[in-house]
């Protein structure tokens, strides 16, 4: 039976793509902007476009690579576009080989039951607008089960961290989420991409495939500990640098002021 959501020409609207794939329309629009999807098959107006079935397959593939194979979007783009300057087919195979236990352990959150999208505002005190913004930025990613969107695993920990920040007095005025979070996503995204490249290129031909998932998991966990400690160290260093800079500027201002006052006294004595 043909899909009733198709147009008579056998094409889909973006809302149909969303229903077919379980990916929110905002996320699909993000994929289009970022070049993960090609231009629309047919564009009939400024805000109206139609897409063929290949878009359904490609969106599902992106979703699988992003969620099940734990790949960042720029690597996914390289995979889709076969850009070997970013990642080679052999390296993709290696990444695919470390899924399974690796992915499950990273996502599994003991004691945290999945939370439906509609319950997030009540549970975490986050507005739908803010939640949708976090989804667009890739900070949290809902999973679709039988037409219902849920958040699970580390996404719940992230949302709970926002609650803890508010309770600690770190308000949106002190930590402007709309400006700060994109910086975090960009910086961490670039970091994990380079980490993945280095890891994959280092283990190729040196580590047995059966050992890869556990080795990758250990690398992630210890890397998180290292980055946390390094961040604290660099924060202290930045504070010291700012304090030294402030002290030097203060001394310079005082010296300049003393010179002006001293020169005035000499002129008057003369």
Image (spheres, rainbow, N blue to C red):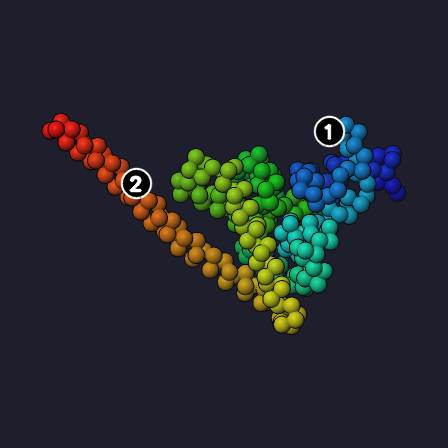
Q: Judging from the image, what secondary structure is the residue with disc 2 in?
A: helix
For the C terminus, give its image quadrant.
top left
Q: Which residue is mark 1?
A: 47
Depth order, front residue of 226/125: 226
Q: Which residue is mark 2?
A: 249
Mark closer to the chain start, 1 or 2: 1
For the N terminus, give its image quadrant.
top right
Q: Which residue is located at x 61 percent, y 40 percent?
A: 136
x, y percentage for residue 186?
55, 46
**Does residue 106 show up?**
no
x, y percentage for residue 11?
83, 37
Instruction: Say few, some or many: other residues with alpha carbon within 10 Å of mark 1 (under 14 / 14 to 19 / 20 or more).
Output: few
- Which residue occupies the extreme left position in the image? 269
* 258 in relation to 198, above or below: above
268 left or right of 218 in image: left
121 left or right of 250 in image: right
170 left or right of 8 in image: left
Residue 15: numbered disc: none
Figure quadrant of residue 105: bottom right
Depth order, front residue of 92/57: 92
Q: Which residue is located at x 31 percent, y 47 percent?
A: 244
Instruction: Say few, some or many: other residues with alpha carbon within 10 Å of mark 2 (under 14 / 14 to 19 / 20 or more).
Output: few
* 108 in relation to 215, above or below: above
Q: Judging from the image, what secondary structure is the residue with disc 1 in?
A: loop
x, y percentage for residue 143?
65, 47
């Amino acid at each position: 039976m043909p899909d009733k959501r198709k147009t008579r020409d056998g094409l889909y609207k973006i809302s149909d793509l969303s229903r077919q794939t379980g990916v929110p329309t905002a996320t699909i629009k993000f994929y289009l902007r970022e070049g993960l999807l090609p231009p629309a098959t047919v564009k009939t107006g400024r805000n109206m476009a139609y897409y063929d079935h290949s878009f359904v397959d490609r969106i599902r593939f992106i979703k699988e690579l992003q969620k099940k194979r734990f790949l960042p979007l720029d690597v996914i783009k390289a995979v889709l576009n076969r850009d070997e300057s970013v990642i080679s087919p052999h390296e993709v195979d290696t990444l695919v080989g470390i899924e399974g236990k690796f992915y499950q352990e990273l996502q599994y959150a003991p004691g945290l039951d999945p939370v439906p999208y509609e319950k997030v505002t009540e549970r975490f005190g986050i507005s739908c607008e803010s939640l949708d913004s976090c989804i667009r930025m890739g900070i949290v990613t809902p999973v679709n089960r039988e037409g219902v969107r849920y958040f699970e695993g580390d996404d719940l920990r992230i949302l709970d961290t926002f609650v803890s920040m508010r309770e600690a007095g770190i308000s949106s005025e002190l930590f402007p989420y709309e400006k700060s979070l994109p910086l975090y996503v960009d910086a961490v995204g670039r970091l994990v991409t380079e980490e993945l490249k280095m890891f994959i290129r280092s283990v190729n031909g040196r580590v047995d495939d059966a050992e890869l998932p556990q080795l990758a998991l250990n690398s992630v966990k210890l890397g998180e500990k290292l980055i946390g400690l390094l961040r604290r160290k660099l924060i202290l260093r930045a504070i010291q640098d700012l304090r030294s800079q402030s002290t030097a500027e203060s001394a310079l201002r005082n010296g300049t002021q003393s010179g002006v006052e001293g020169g005035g006294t000499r002129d008057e004595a003369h």
